[in-house]
C-alpha cells in the first residue's frame, strides 16, 4: 500500500518514517519533503504543494490514505477537497481547523462550552485594546487572531510592551490579515505541556504526552520560536492530570465540535498550562501534530501506525490502542544562523549518517529545513534544520545520547539549546 504525507518539516519526516515501518506499506510519498526524507529508505519526495494537484496524484497513484502535517493546507481545505473526491485522508475539515486558524473562534468556543482557558477579550480597535490592557495590567498576553507561524503571540511583562504589541498588530499591520484582530488574555502561571490526541469525529485516542521548549535560548530566554526541542513523556502530566485533561478539556471539545455540526477528525493538539494544583487550562489548540513534539513521540510509538490511522479514518478508534516504548525520547533542534528572524540558508551539514538517518536503534537525525545539494552534500534550507532525537532509560540518559551525537553533526552558525529536558530533570531531582 502507498501512503502520502503532506509537509516538509521534522514532524513530517518522523511521521512518514514511522508509517513506512507498518507492515503492508510499500512506499510513503512526502510532499514536498526535505533532504532527510530524500535519504530515508521507504520514503520518496514528491515536488507538489498545490492541494488540487495532490488530490490528482493520490487518485492516479492509488494512494491508500493521506496524512497532513502542517496547518496551512488544513486551513485551505485539503481534507474537504480529498473527501469530495472520495480519497481517504486523516485531518480536520477547514471548518474544524478553525480551532487553530482563528484564536478568536477557539476562545469563543471554549467560553461557550466551559472549557478552562484564560479570560480574554477580542479587539480590532487599537484604542479599545490599549484601554483594556491599561485597566487589566501586566503581565498580559497579546495574540494575533490568525495563523502567524508561531510569531503571533507576545507575552508582555509591562503595559508599555503590551501597547507596543497592539500597535504593531492593529496599527502598523505587521502581521497582515492575521493581526487584523487581536485576542488579549490573562497571563497564566504554571508549567506547559503538549497533549495530542487522535480523533475520529467521536472517539479519542491519546498519544503520549510531551513538552516543547519554545524560547530560543537556555533557561527559557530569548524570542519565541517554533520549538527548540522536546521530550516525551512529560512528567508534569501525571495520571491524575491526564484524567483531568481528558475530562475537562479534550472530551468536551470533541463533543461540542460534533454538536455544533463540525465534527473533529485528525490530530488535535492542546497546548496546556498546568498550575501548581494540577489544574490544566488551554493556551491554544492546534489542529495537527506538534513540531518538534512529534519526533520524540514517533520514536516511542510501537505497533502498526498505518493500521491505527485507518481505524481513525473509518471512525473506529475505539477498536485500537497504541503501545509506547517505556523509555524517554528527547529531541534537540539544531537551528540555522539568525533563526528565528532571518535564517541563513545554504550551509553544508557535516556528520550525517552515511545512509538513511538512523544512528543505531535508538537515535534518529530527523530533518526539517534541509535540501540535497550537489554531489552527496545536504545543505540548510530553513530555520529549524535538524532534530536529533534519542531514546534512553531516563530523561538524563536520552539527553546525554542526543547531545553526544550533536558533537559530530552540525553546520556553520548552528544554534541550539543545551538544556532540553531541564524541567523533567529538575522535577526528578526535587523528587
Ligand atoms: P500560543 O501560540 O497561544 O501557545 O502561545 C505561544 C506561547 O506563549 C505559549 O507556548 C506560552 O509559552 C505563551 N503563552 C500563551 N498564552 C499564555 C498565557 N495566557 N499565559 C502565559 N503564557 C502564555
Ligand atoms: N511545537 C509547537 C507547535 O507545533 O505548535
Image (spheres, rainbow, N blue to C red):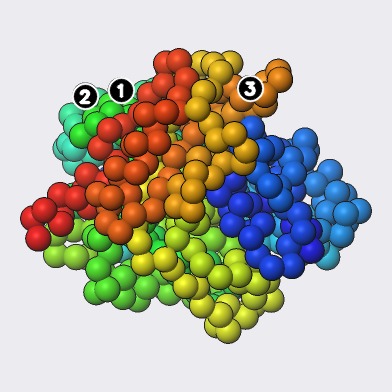
Q: How many marks?
A: 3
Q: Position of residue 112 (x, y in %)?
A: 40, 66
- Relative height, residue 182 to residue 373 (above, below): below
- For marks 3 and 2 on the same chain, the one whose residue lies earlier in the sequence: 2
Answer with left or right where residue 370 lies relative to residue 205. Answer: right
Q: Nearer the viewer, residue 260 or 354?
A: 354
| SS under mark 1 | helix
Q: Is residue 295 visible?
A: no
Give me the residue at 28% from left, 50% from top. 397
**Is 172 placed above or below 75 here?**
above
Q: Nearer the viewer, residue 100 or 348?
A: 348
| Number of the front mark, 3 or 1 | 3
Quarter of the figure that contains the N terminus: bottom right
Q: Is residue 43 left or right of residue 95?
A: right
Q: Which residue is mark 1?
A: 164
Query: Is there any visible trace of residue 267 in the rendered image?
Result: yes
Quadrant location of residue 339? top left
Q: CA distance from mark 3 to mark 1?
A: 44 Å
- Residue in the image at 40% along x and 48% along y: 390
Residue tagged by mark 3? 377
Q: Position of residue 174 (x, y in %)?
A: 47, 22
At numbered mark 3, what does the secondary structure look like: helix, strand or loop?
A: loop
Is the Cβ of the residue at disc 2 closer than 8 Å to that at disc 1? yes
**What residue is shown with label 2?**
160
Which quadrant holds residue 23? bottom right
Query: In x, y percent, where is residue 226?
Result: 43, 37
Amino acid at each position: 500500500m502507498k501512503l502520502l504525507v503532506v509537509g516538509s518539516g521534522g514532524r513530517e519526516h518522523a511521521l512518514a518514517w514511522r508509517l513506512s515501518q507498518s507492515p503492508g506499506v510499500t512506499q510513503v510519498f512526502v510532499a514536498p519533503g526535505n533532504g532527510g526524507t530524500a535519504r530515508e529508505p521507504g520514503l520518496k519526495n514528491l515536488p507538489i504543494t498545490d492541494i488540487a494537484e495532490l488530490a490528482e496524484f493520490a487518485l492516479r497513484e492509488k494512494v491508500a490514505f493521506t496524512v497532513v502535517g502542517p496547518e496551512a493546507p488544513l486551513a485551505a481545505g485539503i481534507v474537504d477537497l480529498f473527501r469530495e473526491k472520495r480519497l481517504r485522508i486523516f485531518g480536520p475539515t477547514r471548518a474544524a481547523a478553525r480551532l487553530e486558524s482563528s484564536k478568536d473562534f477557539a476562545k469563543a468556543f471554549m467560553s461557550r462550552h466551559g472549557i478552562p482557558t484564560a479570560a480574554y477579550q477580542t479587539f480590532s480597535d487599537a484604542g479599545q485594546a490599549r484601554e483594556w490592557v491599561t485597566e487589566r495590567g501586566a503581565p498580559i498576553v497579546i495574540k494575533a487572531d490568525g495563523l502567524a507561524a508561531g510569531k503571533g503571540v507576545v507575552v508582555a511583562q509591562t503595559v508599555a510592551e503590551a501597547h507596543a504589541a497592539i500597535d504593531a498588530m492593529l496599527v502598523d499591520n505587521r502581521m497582515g490579515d492575521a493581526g487584523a484582530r487581536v485576542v488579549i488574555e490573562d497571563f497564566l502561571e504554571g508549567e506547559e505541556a503538549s497533549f495530542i490526541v487522535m480523533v475520529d469525529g467521536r472517539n479519542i485516542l491519546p498519544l503520549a504526552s510531551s513538552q516543547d521548549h519554545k524560547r530560543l535560548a537556555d533557561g527559557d530566554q530569548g524570542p519565541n520560536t517554533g520549538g527548540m526541542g522536546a521530550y516525551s513523556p512529560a512528567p508534569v502530566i501525571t495520571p491524575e492530570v491526564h484524567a483531568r485533561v481528558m475530562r475537562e478539556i479534550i472530551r468536551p471539545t470533541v463533543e461540542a465540535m460534533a454538536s455544533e455540526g463540525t465534527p473533529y477528525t485528525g490530530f488535535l493538539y492542546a497546548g496546556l498550562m498546568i498550575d501548581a494544583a494540577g489544574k490544566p487550562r488551554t493556551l491554544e489548540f492546534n489542529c495537527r501534530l506538534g513540531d518538534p513534539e512529534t519526533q520524540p513521540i514517533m520514536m516511542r510509538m510501537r505497533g502498526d501506525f498505518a493500521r491505527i490511522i485507518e481505524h481513525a479514518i473509518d471512525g473506529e478508534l475505539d477498536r485500537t490502542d497504541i503501545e509506547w516504548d517505556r523509555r524517554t525520547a528527547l529531541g534537540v533542534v539544531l537551528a540555522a544562523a539568525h533563526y528565528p528572524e532571518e535564517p541563513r540558508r545554504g550551509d553544508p551539514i557535516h556528520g550525517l549518517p552515511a545512509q538513511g538517518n538512523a544512528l543505531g536503534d535508538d537515535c534518529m537525525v530527523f530533518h526539517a529545513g534541509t535540501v540535497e545539494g550537489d554531489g552527496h552534500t545536504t545543505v540548510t534550507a530553513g530555520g529549524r534544520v535538524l532534530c536529533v532525537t534519542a531514546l534512553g532509560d531516563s530523561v538524563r540518559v536520552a539527553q546525554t545520547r542526543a547531545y553526544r551525537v550533536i558533537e559530530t553533526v552540525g553546520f556553520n552558525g548552528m544554534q541550539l539549546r543545551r538544556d532540553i529536558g531541564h524541567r523533567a530533570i529538575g522535577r526528578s531531582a526535587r523528587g
